[in-house]
Amino acid sequence: MAGKRETKKEELKARLVAAGTDLIQEQGLKSLRARDIAERAGAALGGLYTVFDDLDGLILHVNSGTLKRLETALNTAVRPAAGIEETFLSLSLAYLRFALAERNLWSALFEHRMPEGVAVPEWHVAEHAFLIGLIAAPLARQLHDASPEDVAIRARTFFAAVHGVISLSLEGRFIGITPEVLEREVTALAGILARSGD
């Protein structure tokens, strides 16, 4: 009996996460409401809270799915034998294309904040590690004398530079770049950053 109950709970969880994913993709994180998710999932509002403690818990699971798709996209973009400049270019362009294709879900990764005093669960923090790891691995091969800490700092700086250009541009900030030239400029930035790893 308990096994059947757990199966039903997992099925409900999957429907709720799928509904949350669809709604964020359609209208963005700021418009997300628990009632709309439950309705889209064909569940009672109380059903959401039998699976998740709160709406933040559901959003973390939506973001988890987005991170898995992003990780797949980035890993697929990189050739194992590629040099650092080609690797950085491939990662940067794959990141940009993912952000453009899944803009609202990509934005939700960085817009979502836990309530004050509530830490992001360790399992979710760990899911972000590939963003730096995919950059740090080729950097470590390039920066032979650098400590692991220095490699990690350089990798985080690279990520922040590329992410910042894309984020500011997609948000339409005055300092951002128009979508028409964004790919060209991300390509140029990746080349500059790769060469700075020498």
Image (cartoon, rainbow, N blue to C red):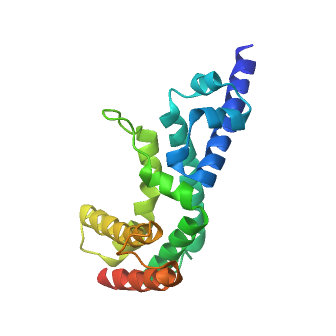
Q: How many marks?
A: 0
Q: Quarter holding the N terminus?
A: top right
Residue shown at the point (44%, 80%) measured from the top left: 186
Whole-percent x, y for residue 98 in the image: 57, 66
- Camera-nearest residue between 9 and 165: 165
Q: In this view, does 86 lie above or below 66?
A: below
Q: Can residue 74 be seen in this view?
A: no
Whole-percent x, y for residue 127 in the image: 47, 49
Q: Is residue 179 above or below residue 120?
A: below
- Camera-nearest residue between 44 and 198: 44
Q: Quarter holding the C terminus?
A: bottom left
Q: Can residue 17 be seen in this view?
A: yes
Q: Is residue 97 above or below residue 71?
A: below
Q: Is residue 19 above or below residue 173?
A: above
Residue shown at the point (42%, 37%) measured from the top left: 121
Residue lying at the far top of the rendered structure: 1
- Indicate left or right for 195 with 41 as reference: left
Q: Quadrant of residue 136?
A: bottom left
Whole-percent x, y for residue 123 in the image: 46, 40
- Camera-nearest residue between 94 and 174: 174
Residue shown at the point (54%, 75%) measured from the top left: 80
- Indicate left or right for 73 with 124 as reference: right
Whole-percent x, y for residue 111 in the image: 43, 51
